[in-house]
Image (cartoon, helix red, strand yellow):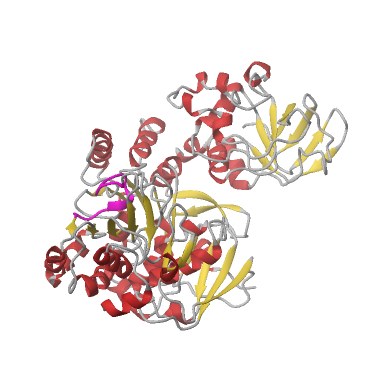
Amino acid sequence: MKPSILKGKVWILRDSNNKMINNIDTDMIFHNKYLHITNINEMGQYALDNLEGWTDFSKKAEPGDILVVGENFGAGSSRQQAVDCFISLGIQALIGESFGAIYKRNTINAGLPLIESPHIGGMEGDKLKMESGNEVEIDLLNGTILNKTTGKSYKANPLPEVVYEIYQNGGVFEYAKKF
Amino acid sequence: MGQSVIQQILSRHSDQKPVVGDIIWMNIDLRTARDFGGPNVVENLEHYFENNKKVDDISKTYFTFDTVAPAKNIGYADNQHKCRMFAWKEGIKIFDVDQGIGTHIMLEKGYVGPGYTAVGTDSHYNILGAICAFGQGMGDQDIALAFRAGRVWYEVPPSMLVSIKGKPRELFSAKDLTLKVLGRLGAKGALGRCIEYKGEPVDKLDLPGRITLASMATEMGAISSFIIPDEGVLEFCKKRMGKLPSFIPEMEENVDYIEKIEIDINDCIPQISRPNHPEDVVSIDEAAGAKIHSVFIGSCTNGRFEDFEAAARLLEKHKVEQSVMCRLVPSTREVYGQLLESGLLRKFYEAGAIISNPGCGGCASGQIGMTGTGEVQISTSNRNFKGKQGNGLTYLASPLIAAACAIKGEIVDYKTLLNMM
C-alpha cells in the first residue's frame, strides 16, 4: 500500500514578484529539445529548466517534495516526459489551481497524485499562507491539506476513487495488469 | 432531474454514478488505433505487458490505417508494419491502407451503434455522435489501456444544448449548418463539454449530414456532440449491426445544461471558413472573388457518397478550371465502390478531377499533395490551421461550394452559384 497521507516540503511556482505563474506549458516544463530522452532516470535534471526563475529546480528539489502550481499548468503538447521528469526527481504530488486537459490525464495515468483546488497557491484566497519550503501534509482520502509550518489547514477535494486506485497501483498500466 | 445523453451512455458503461465533474471508469465497446498513434499503443503494450495478455477482447479491437495510405515515407511504412506484426501476433483484425477512414468503416461494418462507447487515436472520433454513440480520440497511453483493460477513466463532462431553427435559402447544406454553428460557438465555445443538438434543421439531416455536423465538435472545443437518431439512422444501424441495441439515447426533460444556445439559420446562404481559423466563418458572398488554385473534396467530414453526389451536381455539367487542381478522396472503399457503380467516377474523370484511393486524403500530411507558398485551396475537411496542409491558405466549405470554386477558379457568390445549377 502506498501512503494515503503525504508529508513533504512545498515548492510554489511563483515569479520574482511573488505571483503565481499561470499557463506554464510543456516546453517550459520539459523542453522539446530533450524529447529524444526515454529513460525516466535521465529526465529529472531537465525539469523546469526552461521556466524563468526556476531553471535550477532540479538541483534544489529533493525526493518527497510537493510542487504547487497555478492555473492551466501543463498546457500544450501531450509529452509524457513533462510528468515523468517530476517523478524522476521524486516529487510526491502536484497541487494546482487547474491543469491542461491532456497533462491531467498523463499525470493521473502515471500514478502521480494531483490535487486540483482553486486559489490554493495564489496570494489571494490562499488559506494555507504557504511559502516555498513550508512543511505540508496532504490527506489524499479526505482532501485536507495542512500547512504544518503555519498551522493553517484547508479542505480541498479528496482524490477521486479512480485516481486513488491508479495511484495505489503505481500507474494506470500497473493497474491494468490486474485484468 | 433528467440525464444528459453522455450521462445516459455512461450510466450503462460504468458501475459508478455519472455525476458531472466526477472521475469514473468507463467500459469501452469499441477500441481502435490507426497508423498515427497506433505504433505508440503497440510500444506501450509490448513494454508494460511484456509477459502478460495484451488485449482484453480482440472482437472489440481493430487497427485502421487511414492517415497516410499507402505509406508514402519510411516512417509511416515502419509504423504501419509495426502495427501489422502486432495485430497478426495477437489476432487483431486490420483494416489496411486500402480500406479508408477508420471511424467511417466502424459505422459501415456496424461495429458501433447508438449508445455505444468507442475510443481511438483519431481526434475526430467524436464523429460517432452522428448515430448518438460516444466516441473520443485519446492519447496512446489511454488507448493502450483500452486495448488491455477494456476501460478508461473519464471525467464526466457537462453538457450544453444547441437548438437550431429557421429555414435557410436553397443549397444550404449540412456543412453550411456546421460552419454556422462553429462560427457562433467559436473555437472554445464548447470547451470540455458535450453538445446536444435539437431543432428541425438538425432532425432533417440524413446520416452523411449528421456525420458532417458531429465531425466538427472538435473544432468547437467540444469533447463530443450528439444527435438523436431518426428512422433513417436507426434503419442504417439495424441493417449494419444485424439488430439494434436495446438502449437508444433520448433527449430527456429537465436536464441541467451548463448553457443553452439558440441559432437561427433563417435565410442563411452557404458559408465558408476563412484561412487559418476554422471558426472564422462568413457567408460565401463575403469571401467571393478570391482566387482558388486547388480543391480537396473528401475527409471524415465530407467524404460520403452523398457528398460526392452534391459535388457532381456541378461537375457533371461543368469542367474544372484548367489552372485548378481538383482532388477527390472517398472516405472508404465502400464509397469508392458506390462512385464506381453510380458512374460518378467517370463524370469526375471527364470533368478533369484527380481521384485518389480512400483515406484521410487532404487532412493527412501531404497524402494527396500540399499547398505551396501563395497557393489558395478550398477544402471540405474540418481544419485549416496555418501550415497544416502546406504553406498556402485553406478555406473550408461544402462539397457543392468546393466544386463551384473548382469550376470558376475563384470563390463564387451565391447568385453565381444559383446560375451554375
Q: Quadrant of the N terminus of chain B?
A: bottom right
In the picture as drawn, the residue positioned furthest to the right comes out as A151
The image quarter containing residue B169 is bottom left
Q: Nearer the viewer, residue B252 or A2?
A: B252
Magenta includes A114? no
Q: Quadrant of the C terminus of chain B?
A: bottom left
Classify B308 as above or below B83. below
Classify A130 as above or below B238. above
**Residue A151: x, y in percent?**
88, 33
Q: Nearer the viewer, residue B330 or B254?
A: B330
**Residue B4: x, y in percent?**
56, 68
Overall secondary structure of the magenta section: loop
Residue B108: tell me if it is visible: yes
Image point (26%, 63%), residue name: B406
Left or right of B49 in this view: B258: right
**Residue B148: x, y in percent?**
40, 43
Image point (45%, 27%), residue name: A35
Left or right of A110 in this view: B67: left
Magenta includes B362? yes
Residue B116: tell me if it is visible: no
Q: Which residues are magenta?
A: B356-371
Left or right of B382 in this view: B77: left
Q: Nearer the viewer, residue B18 or B64?
A: B64
Image point (27%, 62%), residue name: B409
Classify B93 as above or below A168. below
Q: Nearer the viewer, residue B364 or A107?
A: B364
Classify A62 as above or below A174. above
Q: How many labels sit on residues? A: 0
**Residue B387: x, y in percent?**
39, 44
